[in-house]
Image (spheres, rainbow, N blue to C red):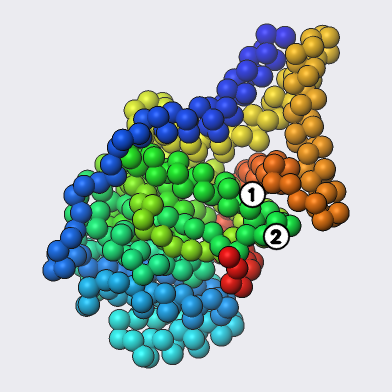
Amino acid sequence: MEWIAATIFWLSLLGILHSYLFYPVLLRWLSKGKKLNALVYTEEDEWPQVSVIMSAYNEEQVIGQKMDSLLQLDYPDGKLSLYVGSDCSTDQTNAILERYSADNPNIHFFPYTSRRGKPGVINELAEIALQEGGSGPEHLFIITDASVMMDPHCARALARHFKNPEIDVVDAHMIHIGMTEEDISRAEDEYISSEVQLKHREGLVWGKMIGPFGGCYALRANRFSKVPSNFLVDDFYITMKVFEQGGKAINDLEATCREPVSHEIREEFRRKARISAGNFQNLLTFTHLWWPPAGPLGFAFFSHKVLRWLGPFFMLAILFSSGLLALGDNLFYTLMFWVMAGALIFLPLLDALFNSLGINLLPLRGARYFVMMNLALLRGFINFIKGIRSNVWEPTKRDHRSKP
């Protein structure tokens, strides 16, 4: 019995350490000196046709700013079209978008009268864009969220890489704005920033970036795959379908865009739980891409995503196996049990206490954020087991006020 508990303990610990420590360190080492992609568009007359696709639902606070950011994109005249679908918005989103479409002939606005979820809107807009812009490899989609503001050079930075026929997906560099000391925003930004670097290095080393952030990324129109009606994480699904077709995916750090970071821990928990349920959908759908974890794609998928999605189960396994082994008066496992129990319970409570007193320590906030993230993964797994019938949901609340 003890050897079984010890095996569970060490395999679980190895799974966590590999995904969060060993794999990032390995990628940092492998990516040294590597260039992202040398075959890019440069001449003004060779840039491909781009269709920007965006789903919006009750985005009156940001939709005007978003449309302004799209209209000021630096891209050759006549080669950029905007396809915007409102997912039965009930605020002023439709009225604002109607004004923009009336003033700009390259904006195609579709006010849907029934909820269908972001993937459903994207599916319909993509079909329209394919009919109007063609289904050849020189036609590109840029799929973006209403809350994400693209810098003027972003479209060119994304599109330039598609001169290389091997590249089918290019992710933008998401930069968070509006961080404060008193909430989870800095912890969220630290995590996302580390993820940006990890995805960038996966592209550098193998051309196998394991999923874009979804807020802003480009892909060849002929590589777009319709997202199933009950799937929650559309960007990951689309990228994995590209990998099934043998394409490459990269992240360009120069293709910058900006989004307000999440501040409320309950809202972020809700968002991550939803994403987690979608992660487990993709885990089963694309098992053939990560198992066995051999070859660049399988190894990256398993190391970066699968092990992280199983993180809460590893933590519970470490806690219970070390507790069981501690009953035999083993000092090491007794220490590990209390370290794990303290990390999962004491540190988040301590951070909540300090926060109530106006004391904000980033390491403690990071520990609380990490625990919250894994609890959300666990909650998402439970939702996945119960069954997911619809991908319609209410967007996460974000603070859209201008902050440094």
How far from the left and from the top, in percent, is residue 208?
A: 35, 40
Q: Name the residue type under label 1.
A: Ala
Identity of the residue drawn at 82% across and 56% down: 358
Count of numbered badges drawn on the protein: 2
User: Residue 223 or 166: which is nearer the viewer?
Assistant: 166
Instruction: Return the x and y of residue 326 as percentages of the image width and height.
Output: 80, 15
Q: Nearer the viewer, mark 1 or mark 2?
A: 1
Residue at which label 1 appears: 187
Residue 285: image quadrant is top left
Q: Residue at x 79, y 32 (%)?
A: 342
Can residue 241 be seen here? The reply is no
Quadrant (top left/top right/bottom left/bottom right) for the C terminus: bottom right
Whether 54 is drawn above or below 98: the answer is above
Q: Quadrant of residue 131?
A: bottom left
Residue 55 location in percent, x, y?
46, 70
Q: Identify the image quadrant of the N terminus.
A: top right
Q: Is residue 181 visible?
A: yes
Figure check: 226 above or below 239: below
Report how far apart the C-alphas of labels 1 and 2 lie in the structure.
Answer: 12 Å
Q: Amino acid at mark 2?
A: Glu
What residue sits 27% from the left and 71% below the top?
75
Residue 123 percent across, percent down from the top left: 39, 64
Mark 1 neighbour class, 10 Å CA radius: few under 14, some 14 to 19, many 20 or more: many
Q: Tell me if residue 310 comes above or below residue 404 in the rendering.
A: above
Specify which label sits upstream in the sequence, 1 or 2: 1
Q: What secondary structure is found at the residue carrying circle 2?
A: loop
Q: Residue at x 37, y 25 (%)?
A: 294
Residue 195 lies left or right of residue 80; in this view the side is right
**Relative depth, front residue between 190 and 283:** 190
Q: Which mark is residue 245?
A: none
Residue hosting label 2? 264
